[in-house]
Image (cartoon, grey):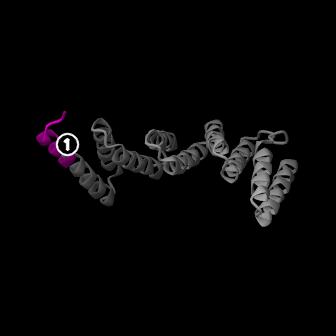
């Protein structure tokens, strides 16, 4: 077990990194801020303060994005997402994974972006959140199109929209059910255009 003095010192050290990182960024010294946020995240991870570690990785990713270093930004968002997942913070995991996808798209790494959107879609689908699944799968299809891939046979969004239709129909929400079928038609139109 850690002694109280060691815990207090680690806490003070992390607070110092955080304070200095914010000051460095305010002064326009992103490189110094990046290093301080990384030290903050590393320290919080070693101490088991995983939520604050996510905060550190989020700030690391944010600065990498600001510096157009999108691959490293994506990796930092994914580190934060992995911690969110391990804590059972599913909404936060989805949010951070979407940010990682944005960074992969900016970097032109369409395969990683598509894979992560599909992972998000699979996550939602297994939880019977068919709207979330369909949305993520449509994002994957959009990325596939950006990469020049043929989506004419990519039916995963259709299957999710149809399950969303069935879900809402079973629950008596006929407007939402009908809207889901409109999304199927819209996606089919997009498949034919591309």
- Residue 103, image x and y in percent? 55, 46
In the current view of this chain or complex, which residue is farthest to the top?
1
Magenta-highlighted residues: 1-12
Nearer-the-camera pick, 132 or 170: 170
Residue at (61% x, 43% y) in the render: 120
Q: Residue 54 location in percent, x, y?
A: 39, 46
Left or right: 101 in relation to 79 = right
- 61 magenta-colored: no
Q: Splitting the image into 4 quarters, where does residue 100 fall?
A: top right
SS majority, magenta: helix
Q: Relative to residue 47, is residue 130 depicted above or below?
A: below
Please check the rendered image and state whether residue 10 is part of the magenta-colored stretch, yes or no.
yes
Identify residue for label 1. Answer: 10
Residue sitting at 30 percent across and 59 percent down? 27
Per the image, label 1 sits on a secondary structure element best described as helix
* Vertical side of 186 occupied by 114: above or below: above
**Image coordinates for residue 80, horizontal then vertical, percent:** 44, 43
Residue positioned most to the left: 5
Position of residue 139 measured from the top left corner of the image (x, y, whole percent): 69, 49
């Amino acid at each position: 077990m850690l002694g109280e003095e060691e815990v207090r010192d680690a806490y003070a050290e992390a607070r110092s990194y955080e304070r200095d990182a914010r000051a460095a960024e305010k002064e326009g010294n992103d490189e110094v801020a990046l290093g301080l946020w990384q030290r903050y995240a590393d320290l919080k991870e070693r101490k088991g303060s995983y939520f604050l570690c996510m905060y550190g990785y989020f700030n690391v990713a944010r600065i990498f994005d600001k510096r157009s270093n999108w691959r490293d930004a994506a990796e930092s968002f994914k580190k934060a997402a992995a911690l969110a997942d391990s804590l059972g913070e599913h909404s936060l995991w989805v949010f951070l994974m979407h940010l990682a996808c944005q960074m992969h798209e900016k970097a032109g790494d369409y395969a990683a972006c598509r894979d992560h959107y599909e992972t998000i879609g699979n996550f939602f689908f297994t939880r019977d959140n068919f709207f979330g699944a369909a949305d993520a799968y449509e994002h994957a299809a959009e990325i596939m199109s950006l990469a020049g891939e043929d989506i004419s046979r990519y039916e995963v969004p259709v299957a999710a929209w149809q399950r969303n239709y069935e879900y809402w129909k079973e629950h008596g929400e006929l407007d939402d059910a009908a809207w889901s079928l409109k999304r199927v038609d819209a996606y089919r139109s997009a498949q034919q255009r591309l």
